Amino acid sequence: MGEAVEFLQYSNGFCKMNGHHEINKGLLMMNHENYPVINHEAWFEEEIDVDLKWSFALNSVLHRGRSEYQDIVLLDTKRFGKVLVLDGKMQSAEIDEFIYHECLIHPSLLCHPNPKSMFIMGGGEGSAVREALKHKSIEKVVMCDIDEEVVDFCRRHLSANKEAFSSSKLDLVINDAKVGLEERKEKFDIIVGDLADPVEGGPCYQLYTKSFYEKILKPKLNDSGIFVTQAGPAGVFTHKEVFSSIYNTIRQVFKYVVVYTTHVPSFADTWGWVMASDQPLCVDAAMIDKKIQERIEGELDYLNGAMLYSSTILNKTISQTLKNETHVYTEENARFIPGHGVAYCISNQEFMKQV
């Protein structure tokens, strides 16, 4: 066997291959837009768990940086198009983000009798705003994201959301969502948690706690208001990480709680959402289809009445876990998504030469 290959770690989880103690500088070149392009076969790798990883091939790295709050990477991938990665965890992919965002935004708006205002915690890429503005009744959307750098480069690079960012109905606030919501004098019909997954050392795990829901969020909802949040992986092997805990925490605060899940291909898992209110929540398929036709401009690509209703029917394993879950999310006793993202640029041919 040849000399072992050494991998040198850099920010954002990226590394360069170092064989025979010399940095391989042939991995990157610049394209006509001055973005780094991968010269050889390269992959982004996300650690799902200590013994499980998810990787996909890259065309180029559109942005790499580190803000005050998190590592930020925008990638151009071969399979999923542009991909936003924060703290090593995939947040959304161009080719299938509509699945996640339609499920996040439309159910609460369709369950509400007449939604006019929405407060989005996070949502820096603009996709949640885009979906909310499809509703004719919406008059104001406040998007409060802590990371101005994320918002700025998404506004520059994600062309699908340019109209949303320029809408007169959008009130864009750069602030901690907890502070931004607490400082608001008005109440909202819908509050959305479009937050990054709770990662240890990340910027937003406090926004999944009972005290936040009870003392800050719920008082900012109108009487018929609805809260909805993304709740992390909800697969048969991953739903105990944070999904069941977030569900159990929210049901300590609200009278009516609905959970629903669906598969998101770029996440390589089933994903979960929790919707809650002190008023009954109806997800009758015929009623949802009727409201979609009456309330929404244009067509939805993924969500309809039957799909929403079916997504609330959970398998036996997950249903049993939710029924028996006792953990309540607090700042002192939080649960976190395991692992962290690791990206690397490596040529299989070059690697094989070294082993």
Image (spheres, helix red, strand yellow):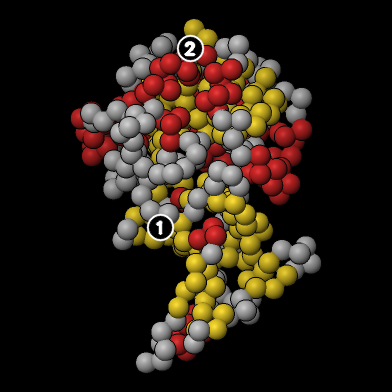
Task: Determine the secondary structure under disc 2.
Answer: helix
| Any part of residue 97 in sight | no
Quickly name the residue at label 2.
219
Mark number, residue 217: none
Q: Locate residue 240 relative to residue 194 in the image: left or right.
A: left
As shown in the figure, which amino acid type bears the numbered disc 1? Answer: Glu
Mark 1 / mark 2, whichever is N-terminal: 1
Tell me residue 139's x, y (percent). Answer: 69, 17
Quickly name the residue at label 1.
47
Rendered view: 19 above or below 235: below
Q: Assign the C terminus to one quadrant of the image.
A: bottom left
Tell me residue 124's x, y (percent). Answer: 62, 38
Which residue occupies the foreground of this view, 49 or 324?
A: 49
Residue pictured at 41% horizontal, 11% vertical: 278
As shown in the figure, which amino acid type bears the numbered disc 2? Answer: Pro
Q: Are marks 1 and 2 in contact (CB under 8 Å)?
A: no
Residue pictured at 72% horizontal, 34% vertical: 165
